[in-house]
Amino acid sequence: MGAANRQIARGAVFSPVSAPAGEIATLGWFVLGVAAAIFLVVFGLLLYSVVRFRARASDEPREPAQLYGSNQIEFAWTAVPVLIVSVLVLTTIRTIYDVQAAKEPPGALHIRVIGHQWWWEFQYPDLGIVTANELHIPLSDSAHPTPTWLRLESADVAHSFWVPRLAGKTDLIPNKINTMWIAPHQTGTYLGQCAEFCGTQHAMMLLRVIVEPRPVFDQWVAAQRLRVPSQSVEPHGRQVFESNACVSCHAVRGTSAHGTYGPDLTHLMSRQTLGSGVALNTPEHLKIWVDDPGRMKPGVLMPAMNLSEKDLDELIAWMVTLK
Ligand code: CUA
C-alpha cells in the first residue's frame, strides 16, 4: 500500500528503532555532516568569487592575469580530500565490521526468510511456524538481548530485504545464503519493501515487521502453532478449498493442503494484509483476491480461480475462520 512508500519517503532511515539501523543512521548523519560542510565551503567560495570578481563596467576588456602551476595549492587540494575520504572510509569500514562481526547471543531467534515473486516466506525452524509477509519478532532489550537472526534465501530471482527503521538492505540471492540480524528496542509495526528489482510486482513486494514484548510474541507463537481443527466449521468452504487447485500451492495445517509454492494459509486471518501488502486483509478484499488476484496485483503468479459465486462465497466463509 501507499503507506509503506510514505514511511520510507519520510526518511525512516533517520529514525531507527533497532540495532544495527541505529549505528547506520549515526554513520549516515556523520557522512551527511562532512558532505554538507564541504558543500558550504565550496559553494561559499564560489559565490564569493562570482560576486567579488564579477566583470565591472570600469574593467579593461582583456583577460585577467593567468596563473600556471602552484605546488602549494595543488598539494592542498590533493591532501585535504585524501584526508577527508580516509576518514569516511575508516568510519564506514568500522561500522560495517561492527555490524557483521556481531556475535549471536544464546537467546537469539532464528528465522529463515525466503524471497518469492512477489511475497515473503518466514519460517521459524526452532518454533515450527511458517508465515508470510508479516514478520513477528520479540523486543530486544539490553538487559535480556533477544535479537533476531535472519537467514536470507531466494526461491527464484534476486530480492532484497529492507526495513529502513530496523536495518540496512541485504540481498536474497538464488543459491546463496546471506545473513543479517536485528535487535529492535521499540515495539510497533515497521514497514519494509523489497529493494532489488525482481519483476512486474517488485513495487508490491511489501512487508511488515511487528515487534512485540516477549509475552505477546509468545502468545502469537502459541496461536500460530495450532492446526486447523478437524471438525471444521464451514465444511462446504473447506471442501471447495481441498478439491480445487488451491492445495497444490498453499498449505493449511490440519487439512490435505500441503503446497509450498504460495504462502501458508493456516493462520491467514491473523495477517493484516493480502498479497504481500497490496490490500488490507478484509473478507471483501479476500473475495476479490481469490476470484481474480490479477485485478489487485497484475502479473501475480496466482491464477484466477473461476469458481462459481456459491463456491466462492462458501470458500471465503471458511477462509475467514483461519485465524
Ligand atoms: Cu522482490 Cu523486488
Image: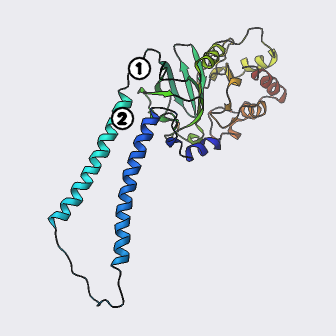
Q: Secondary structure at mark 1?
A: loop
Does the rendering let one see residue 245? no
Does the rendering let one see residue 193? yes
Locate residue 180: give its quadrant: top left
The residue type indicated by label 1 comes to: Glu
Ligand 1 closer than 8 Å to the CB at disc 2?
no
Label 2 crowd (10 A; few <14 / some 14-19 / many >=20): some
Residue 230, placed above or below residue 61: above
Mark 1 lies on residue: 104
Specify whether 162 is left or right of 204. left
The furthest residue to the front? 143
Spot occupied by residue 210 in the image (x, y as percentages of width and height) = 60, 28
Specify whether 212 is left or right of 154. right
Spot occupied by residue 323 in the image (x, y as percentages of width and height) = 72, 20
Specify whether 242 is left or right of 179. right
Mark 2 lies on residue: 96
Q: Secondary structure at mark 2?
A: helix
Label 1 crowd (10 A; few <14 / some 14-19 / many >=20): few
Separation (CA) of disc 1 from disc 2: 16 Å
Locate residue 298: give its quadrant: top right
Q: Which label sits on residue 193?
A: none
Question: Which of the two residues, 229 or 310, is positioned nearer the viewer here?
Answer: 229
Which residue lies at the image location 59% right of the left edge and 22% below the top edge?
213
The furthest residue to the right? 310
Which residue lies at the image location 71% right of the left edge and 40% below the top edge?
295
Ligand 1 closer than 8 Å to the CB at disc 1?
no
Spot occupied by residue 178 in the image (x, y as percentages of width and height) = 42, 28
Which residue lies at the image location 43% right of the left edge and 14% below the top edge?
106
Q: How is the image coloured?
A: rainbow
